[in-house]
Amino acid sequence: MRIALDAMGGDHAPRVTVAGALKAARSGVEVVLVGPEDRLKEELQRQGGHLPIHPAPDWIRMEEQATEVRRRRESSIAVAMELLQRKEVEAVVSMGHTGATMAAALFTLGRVKGVERPALLVEFPSQRGRTFLLDGGANADCRPSFLLQFAAMGLAYAEASGAEAPKVGLLSIGEEEGKGNALVLEAYPLLKAALGERFFGNVEGRDIFLGTTEVVVTDGFTGNVALKLAEGEAKVLLSWIKEALTSSPLARLGALLVLPALRRVRAKVDPAQYGAMPLLGVEGTVLIGHGSADEEAVKNALLRAKALAEAGLLERVKERLSRLYV
Amino acid sequence: MRIALDAMGGDHAPRVTVAGALKAARSGVEVVLVGPEDRLKEELQRQGGHLPIHPAPDWIRMEEQATEVRRRRESSIAVAMELLQRKEVEAVVSMGHTGATMAAALFTLGRVKGVERPALLVEFPSQRGRTFLLDGGANADCRPSFLLQFAAMGLAYAEASGAEAPKVGLLSIGEEEGKGNALVLEAYPLLKAALGERFFGNVEGRDIFLGTTEVVVTDGFTGNVALKLAEGEAKVLLSWIKEALTSSPLARLGALLVLPALRRVRAKVDPAQYGAMPLLGVEGTVLIGHGSADEEAVKNALLRAKALAEAGLLERVKERLSRLYV
């Protein structure tokens, strides 16, 4: 069960990617670093670790166009996808360039049968555990049929993550059927007909954190706004709480006693714990992280890639999709 | 400066509306209750207060269709709008039915010249004060020109609220021009050409809480999802913090000392403090609150209606819109 890591992906590569990979290796993940051999050897030496390297002399810079990847076949992300396509690894992890990683996955691996557009899956912490939302930003404009496919892929993912009889909510602005925008109004009957009892109906923004359904589907524009709003709100709210806890000598004294408990809440909403977002609907297990990810996020992304590959995520996605249009 | 309150609007009317109105009156707002005279007199008596009543024998129930308001001219919300149209009051406040209130405002007051669709304005607390977002849910599907009009109305509102040289951000899924869905890509050049320096460019979900711009514009679907997500997240996060603070004897001891400071954070994110959302783009000052609002929210909605009317909100909106298409 080998996982390829695009060692040149992300804002602080290869320092952070190598550090995260070494941590993941110590936790039992067989990582293959993909990137320029000399540079990676040097970085491994600096950090005092050993990992196998699969050489790729080139890489796509964060400011370059995603489409560059089609031409630059020796770039780290293109080479990593080739390894996955040849089944020399079981999954690929990249901490960005998001667009280039999606383009490379589509170009080299292709789409799963029945999928018009692959989607990014986002995890939110919720009152009942976790909520899986898709699309997290791969498709800004969606057709109703995309949402149905997102729903099937989300169910497969929830099941691979251990959820029992998960349900899908259609993100809207009112609970009743008939509330929403044109996309939601058209998607509702499709989901209802194809998913039967697994379709919960409409859910609202608040249901994401309440955990009303395990899976929530929406277009990639709304999904990405939701993801970044949630991250921004958590950050600002916690900064206010920190401020409040140092606002008086008495509060500072109390803060010392409650700090360990508050750290657990902070960890719950820390994006780094999820590591990366799976790209669902391509012929392979691919995870894409934040460009600004730290080594903890890289480690968690690699652990998650391993767990998903072991849980047979790709086969589950294919199976769910094959049942969709019978 | 008289404000009409639809005394039969909201889930707990007229108990909560009358209680909120009495509080607002004690804070210097001249409130007129609109609704069935006997029932309101009885409720005032029960609560031991006095307020002028403008009689309206009928009211639109929460479960009824919004369009009912066109036919039911003696309903409390229709009568309140008539008072505003005849300038017998300076503003109307209703804690729902949202759809019926919007329909009544459109039907009785009409649209401001240059507005294709009125919009709901939502306030978010932010690191730099407050962020005004529109549309909060009045228009699920929008055309690019709507977003330009929302921007002009948002600027007028920010100025009426005391902001100096406020800027508008276009909510998108990437900061650079050229990132976003079809609506955003079309709206961007319109905003840029019409607003000049007042247009900041694209903002992302996180910028709402960071307060990058005073005004954020988006379609009513995305805006309403953002509003309800933000409320749900604040509620769940604060419940986790409360749990954490009672998780051990030591934490409970510390919690006693930090509680007053934490209450201030809770108040900052409490939707009741905003009271109600202004409906911008109709020929009058109209505020619409949550159906589930408590008396504190009703009071704050009335105080806000007074402040906005005094700040000349409607004239500012008209002035901003008149400059848009010169």
Image (tube, coloured by chain):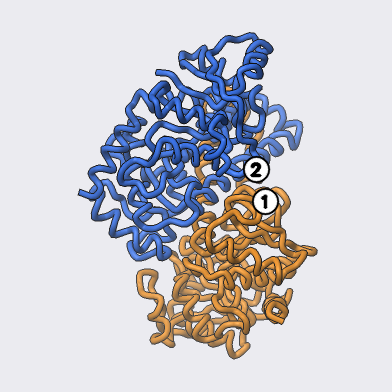
Chain colours: A orange, B blue
Q: Amino acid at mark 1?
A: Ser
**Residue beneath the point at 62% across and 77% down:** A285
**Residue beneath the point at 56% across and 85% down:** A109
Give the secondary structure at mark 1.
strand
Residue placed most toward the observer, A219 or B263: A219
Q: Is residue B40 above or below residue B172?
A: above
Q: Which residue is mark 1?
A: A126
Q: Is residue A51 above or below residue B248?
A: below
Chain for disc number 2: B
Report crowding for label 1: few under 14, some 14 to 19, many 20 or more residues within 10 A (C-alpha): many
Label of residue B236 in the image:
2
Name the quadrant of the N terminus of chain A: bottom right
Report crowding for label 2: few under 14, some 14 to 19, many 20 or more residues within 10 A (C-alpha): some
Give the secondary structure at mark 2.
helix
Find residue A299 and report its horizontal and vertical position in percent.
60, 65
Query: Can residue A25 be seen by looking at this rendering?
Result: no
Taking A277 as reference, is A194 left or right?
A: right
The quadrant holding residue A255 is top right
Residue placed most toward the observer, B153 or A291: B153
Q: Label 1 near label 2: C-beta < 8 Å? A: yes
Label of residue B193 in the image:
none
Find residue B142 and report its horizontal and vertical position in percent.
43, 56
Query: Can residue B150 be seen by looking at this rendering?
Result: yes
Find residue B19 and report its horizontal and vertical position in percent.
61, 19
Residue placed most toward the observer, A311 or A53: A311
Q: Amino acid at mark 2?
A: Val
Question: Of all residues shown, which one is farthest toward the right?
Answer: A164
Find residue B241 and report its horizontal and vertical position in percent.
65, 38
